[in-house]
Image (cartoon, rainbow, N blue to C red):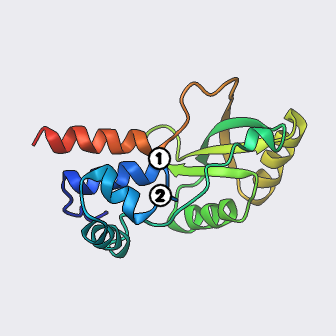
Amino acid sequence: MTRSIKIDSLDLRILTSLLKNARITKVDLGEEVGLSPTPCYERMKRLEKSKVIRGYHADVNFRLLGDYSYFWVKIRLSEFTKDKTAKFERMILDRADILECHAILGHADYLVKVAAKSVEDYHDTLQNLANKEEFFYDSFPISKAVKEPHQASLIRLIQRDYESK
């Protein structure tokens, strides 16, 4: 369970601005959110210290770097025990071709996103995983991204919820 941290509308404006441009200067950030540089910087540091801001990253367009296909895979372990799930999760963490893995509720145990150069490469990935752990799966090849995950969308959701209080 995660702990909610107290933030206000200025904190949300700082986060929104940093999501758009993490390289913004203190002065420009302060101007954009309506604070002088020092109080703005102090708020930013508080958000970092409280782990609301976990880091600053480049937004890389991986499609320009390689021709990969992506697959969502719904996985159900043959045995759902603490040891089997821990083993499966460790195995997933070691794989560069597994981009995301989420434990889910319902008919399946995990939702996994796989990157592969071809359908054969994807098949090899699943075969390799299945050799180490018995599971059942359904594959969903991704034909195009309509809306990819972006933290700015989450900030808008948090702002909406904050403003409705």
Q: Where, quadrant-wise, is the N terminus in this rendering?
A: bottom left
Proximity of marks 2 and 1: CB atoms separated by less than 8 Å: yes
How many numbered marks are there? 2
> What is the three-letter code of the residue carrying label 2?
Ile
Q: Position of residue 91 (x, y in %)?
A: 69, 63
| Lateral position of residue 42 relative to residue 126, left or right | left
Q: Residue at x 38, y 71 (%)?
A: 48
Q: Which one is in front, 139 or 31?
A: 31
Q: Residue at x 32, y 59 (%)?
A: 30
| Above or below 34: residue 73 | above
Element type where label 2 sits in the image: loop
Q: Nearer the viewer, mark 2 or mark 1?
A: 2
Q: Residue furthest bottom?
A: 49
> What is the three-letter code of the residue carrying label 1?
Lys
| Lateral position of residue 156 relative to residue 142, left or right | left
| Above or below 164: residue 14 | below
Q: Position of residue 12 (x, y in %)?
A: 28, 51
Q: Residue at x 87, y 36 (%)?
A: 118
What residue is disc 2 on?
A: 24
Q: Residues within 10 Å of mark 1 (few under 14, many from 20)?
A: few
What residue is disc 1 on?
A: 20
Residue 105 seen in the current view:
no
Q: Residue at x 37, y 57 (%)?
A: 29
Q: Which one is in front, 36 or 76?
A: 36
| Above or below 31: residue 47 | below
* Separation (CA) of disc 2 from disc 1: 9 Å
Q: Where, quadrant-wise, is the C terminus in this rendering?
A: top left
Which image quadrant for residue 57? bottom right
Which image quadrant for residue 71? top right
